[in-house]
Image (spheres, coloured by chain):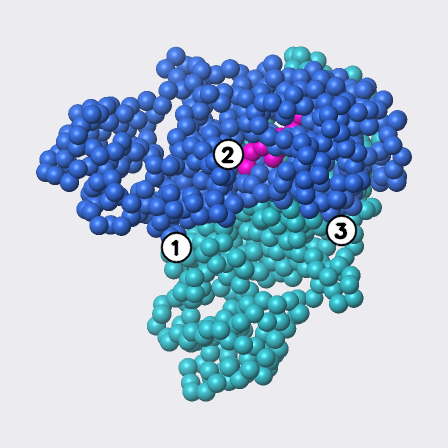
Chain colours: A cyan, B blue
Amino acid sequence: MDQPPRTAQLSDAPSQPAPPRSAPLRIALAGLGTVGAGVIRLIEANADLIARRAGRKLAITAISARDRSKPRGIDISAYAWEDDMAAMAARADVDVVVEMIGGADGPALALARSALAGGKALVTANKAMIAHHGLALAAAAEAAGVALRFEAAVAGGIPVIKGLREGTAANAIERVYGILNGTCNFILSTMEDTGADFAAVLAEAQRRGFAEADPAFDIEGTDAAHKLAILAAIAFGTRIDFAGVETAGIARLLAADIAQADALGYVIRLIGMAETEVGPDGACRLFQRVQPHLVPRAHPLAHVDGATNAVVAEGNFSGRLLFQGAGAGDGPTASAVVADLIDIARERAGSAVPGAPFSVPVGELESLPRAPSGHRRSRSYIRFTVADRPGVLAELTAAMRDAGVSIESLIQKGRGGGDGADAVGVLVAMVSHEGPEAGVTEALRLLEGSDSLTSAPLVMHLLGE
Amino acid sequence: MDQPPRTAQLSDAPSQPAPPRSAPLRIALAGLGTVGAGVIRLIEANADLIARRAGRKLAITAISARDRSKPRGIDISAYAWEDDMAAMAARADVDVVVEMIGGADGPALALARSALAGGKALVTANKAMIAHHGLALAAAAEAAGVALRFEAAVAGGIPVIKGLREGTAANAIERVYGILNGTCNFILSTMEDTGADFAAVLAEAQRRGFAEADPAFDIEGTDAAHKLAILAAIAFGTRIDFAGVETAGIARLLAADIAQADALGYVIRLIGMAETEVGPDGACRLFQRVQPHLVPRAHPLAHVDGATNAVVAEGNFSGRLLFQGAGAGDGPTASAVVADLIDIARERAGSAVPGAPFSVPVGELESLPRAPSGHRRSRSYIRFTVADRPGVLAELTAAMRDAGVSIESLIQKGRGGGDGADAVGVLVAMVSHEGPEAGVTEALRLLEGSDSLTSAPLVMHLLGE
């Protein structure tokens, strides 16, 4: 299980000033966008302290990107340029490949595969690639006896992969959840602060660089679902099941929803949540959901504002742990990428077998069936927009009654609130007592096709304290 | 730098069921109080998942404590009992010694020294011992090529040592600070919730088990100072300087202080804070302080209630990271101890050189001079209790003026508030504009001996957002 190829490579390293205690860790970097350039900037800026902590230098040997001449604000002339990424990964003077290209497939995946197959360690920030191909890549890394690390793929600069993989390793994790998308959190907390509607805040976020020109990946919850699927695999020792994440985004939220939540003592946050449960047959099942939730003000996640991310892990001995910080940006992402590189450097070339990327070897990860959401007991916020005419409220509440949903509170809001509800009708928001989620689904089914409704109802669940 | 003694020992391990991928990590545990017993309970309860994640079993080989027959709620009959801790540490069938005895010196230190000298890895939760003797123990561990780990010594179950040593390893840390003592935080947040005075809340905390019968170590800030000194060493790569921590506790706080802080938009928390700064001679200096602070409501630490701990690290690339969770208790502490054991088990006997306990080898830690607090620019809360007579306010404000302290706000509170101030006189609280802390010190010097003051003034600084 040792790594003879890497040991052999060390002998033909290009001559460099003598590193503190052993040969430099030689890095090839593919992708020189904001984050890739940030990695170079960090390795240069903090070179001395990194060498002290890692016990050896981090030396960038070769770089590659689509366009060599694009201005990046950094001097790349000291690094060997390779047009062909596969050739770069195959260089004898490279120990680790850093993949900063992005995209679940295409050149990123091709590079990752060729690096691992060639016995190079791989560090990536690519959440989509890990969510879709992480297990195959981890199996390749384990077969080659090299490291695969992806701290930066989840929650940016927050060391939460390490936190789960190592920090809480002694615990059976009961639940892992959090705020996994900074764009959505920026939009939601800005809606909260300003009372503005979703579309206006999204436009502002795009102007300020907190949201992409094509924001679908973020606001539809896909990005958060990628991260959640990765966290769940590590927390529960299960195979990644990205397709099993029940995902809803934030695009349908109205300023009125934020206002109603506020009146009830809640804020709205896009929460990714995963937990295991025991099904009626006694077998363990995995539940994964990304959805805007009502978060009580007493919960630490209620105070996570702006583009910040936060992850909560609940262990059977540790209790509740919270990890919070910047979820994106070139600095925080580079911080996580280079932490992975330092871990690899500390493993000392040729001596240690790198840990399993998903905490346990891929072959030992469990394949859990998906837990259906219907039987989950939740409190739900259900928001209708309805025609302004008599009898509508009776129709809604009858549907709830017939579906066995018990209403804890109901707010009907007339026109003229100026909070975005006007355009779609009169707003009726209910909060249910705790009960099976299937009840709410059934109530909405009973109302399907009713011409009292001016838009599709919106359901969000309440996060417990 | 490999570990021949440990490799040799593995061959004469007692026969056990075959572990997943290699021989068990054999553990000797000294000290069977609440936390020591919690470690045993955790290793038993989560044995299977730990073995999967560590790649081998954790096997408790031998145990030792003062009193063999004391009831502990766990069955210890399966483990070899040793009356002599040194003999236990020297057993050939032991790879790691877990020290759960407590106390900076005495039997804990003797055991730690003998374990490391004998080539055994050491895991401890003993903050006092690490704060006082951590460097000597780390040097011994590095010389022997064995691991020394102490995650549980700081902030209980929160993996903050790992967070700083590994998670933020790529960063120059600019500041590390947080809520490091659960007892104080429980008392302060209860005072806040109930309006009760310090003495009453302390008594309640003692009844509920959140405070020791002798609470001095906690409420005087010593425990937080131990933890801060350890964090600072890892964050800044400096030698531990526990004696250099400027320490003030919470015993002099009045309910009226909490109320005044609240009126200004702050809560009061005992904050341990360390940062490096560049002195006038261009040399780097270390500032370490434990003191109750006014924390603005918008700061994440303002929402840390009860016995919870939280640590903030600010890195030059990561930005602000927050780690939060249970700071004490047998479950969280055991979680951290066993995480250390899993790390050691993952390092694979005989293959890897364990990482430096303080991130960089002891010989490379810097010895920084202490930064004086006087030139620090802070906003200060200064609370006086004064005699109820004319001219006193003029006397106080003249002293501030003469010392060059600019007052931003001043509240004088008459008798009858029922918030603990009555007993000591009329309460006058001021908040200064930002300025050198020496100014406030000078103002208090000018007022020294004045018979207008009915008790010594209390100074707290305001934490920035």
Residue at mark 3: chain? A
Residue at mark 1: A193
Label ID, residue A239: 3
Tag 2 near tag 3, CB within 8 Å: no
Find the distance from the CA under tag 2 to the CA under tag 3. 33 Å
Taking the image as drawn, is residue A290 in sight?
yes
> Nearer the viewer's eye, disc 2 or disc 3?
2
Query: Where residue B374 sits: x, y (%)?
Result: 32, 22
Q: Is residue A81 or residue B429 the one in the foreground?
A: B429
**Could you tell whether B169 is left or right of B416 in the image?**
right
Q: Amino acid at mark 1?
A: Asp
Find the distance from the CA under tag 1 to the CA under tag 2. 27 Å
Q: Is residue A323 or residue B117 the one in the foreground?
A: B117
Report the magenta residues as a range. Answer: B148-155
Residue at mark 2: B313
Q: Quadrant of residue A264?
A: bottom left
